[in-house]
Image (cartoon, grey):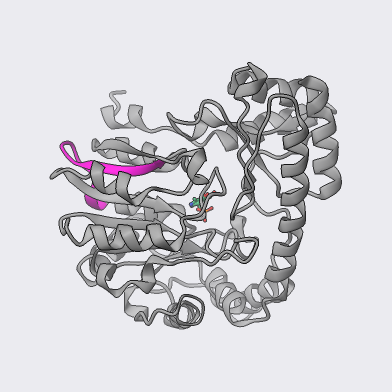
Amino acid sequence: MILAESIGRLETESAFEVLARAAALERQGREIINLGIGQPDFRTPEHVVEAAVKALRDGAHGYTPAQGLLPLREAVAADVAKRRGAEISPENIVIMPGGKPTMFFAMMLFGEPGAEIMYPDPGFPIYRSMIRYTGAEAVPIVLREENGFAFSADEILAGITPRTRLVIVNSPGNPTGGAAPREEVEKLVAGLMDHPHVALMADEIYGRMLYEGREHVSFLSFPEIRDRLILLDGWSKTYAMTGWRLGWSYWPDALIEKAVRLCVNSHSCVNAATQWAGIAALEGPQDAVEAMMRAFDERRRVIVRRLNQLPGVTCLDPAGAFYAFPNISGTGADARTLQTRFLEEAGVATVAGPSFGLHAKDYIRFSYANSVENIERAMDRIAGVL
Ligand code: PLP
């Protein structure tokens, strides 16, 4: 067989490898505390499950429009108006099978040899993987601990060249939990006005997961950038629906038809029952989301306190999402070695910083999507290893 050269550039998401290794250890009878994978440990709210069951019973069995059911796109537009204070048309929204396809398609639209795409580092590993897959050059936007892992608009703007086609930002961010303050968002939008050839992809999948009264500053609330903004969001994290595969994205007029064409060429449409569940999630009671966020906040406090008590470890208070990203440089050990020892010796799954970029060697990601009791036990065990 003669494979395409591009497939050799495709990378992966280590969290799934850690999950597989943790499952293998569990099959051997080990008890593993999973702080590795980025998914809420809650069930999808019951009324959302019921909406999908009802849709299946009512016969929602066929294809839907590739762009997504209109009532769902209307529900998304209404939710955006309510939570982000932005009026957008359902015609600019595409329903996707999860958050990831939006990044895949955005890279397909802009990436090719000779192009540069900027992406957050440390960041979600699929950005760099997909950029490189297209043949474009992946240019890191370094997120620094001293800035609370928020992007610096000045640094992004200084990195733009005539070959830059797309800038990717993710706030609140994976794996750091950092969130950009309003000033940085405003500065970036203003600065991009001097670079009209550059599009922006804002991954706001953790937009409703912020703590201590922090506000989510959505790029959708800046009309001046909307004609070159792709906004990625979805149900996976907010509504504990990672396995349903349901996401949405905003595309400007110039790109919407191309985005839908990519859908037609890849997955045709998202399964119909899941789309009806998505409507129930957005329009129904939000108490389950609020309860989940209260639980995450409590766990966040516990894990940050416990991490800071470990020898050689320091950890910032994450502003959002459900990840703590402690600096482990004081332990004198390498992050990948620690990831392996935590899993093999202590039965605690985590993901080493280098899985998230070139600028993350001193860190380890802990997902606190697990009970306070398990977090406390995991920290006891890790303290033993250290
Ligand atoms: N964007 C970020 C920053 C993420 O962390 C994730 C999942 O971990 C996604 C997008 C993808 O979400 P989905 O599971 O809906 O594809």
Q: Which residues are magenta?
A: 109-120
Front-lying residue, 92 or 175: 175
Using the rendered image of the protein, determine whether residue 81 is visible from the camera's viewpoint: yes
Q: Quick check: 287 left or right of 111?
A: right
Q: Where does residue 346 sit, x and y in percent of width and height?
A: 80, 25
Q: Where does residue 240 sit, x and y in percent of width and height?
A: 65, 61
Front-lying residue, 4 or 363: 363
Q: Where does residue 16 sit, x and y in percent of width and height?
A: 59, 37
Q: What quarter of the picture does the N terminus occupy?
A: top left
Looking at the image, which residue is at 72% across and 57% down?
297
Front-lying residue, 72 or 263: 72
Q: Can you tell which quarter of the image residue 4 is in?
A: top left
Residue 201, relative to residue 78: is it above or below? above
Using the rendered image of the protein, determine whether residue 107 is visible from the camera's viewpoint: no
Q: Can you tell which quarter of the image residue 20 is in?
A: top right
Q: What quarter of the picture does the C terminus occupy?
A: top right
Q: Where does residue 316 sit, x and y in percent of width and height?
A: 62, 43
Looking at the image, which residue is at 70% across and 33% down?
349
**Residue 115 is a magenta residue:** yes
Looking at the image, which residue is at 46% across and 75% down?
84
Q: Quick check: 256 left or right of 337?
A: left
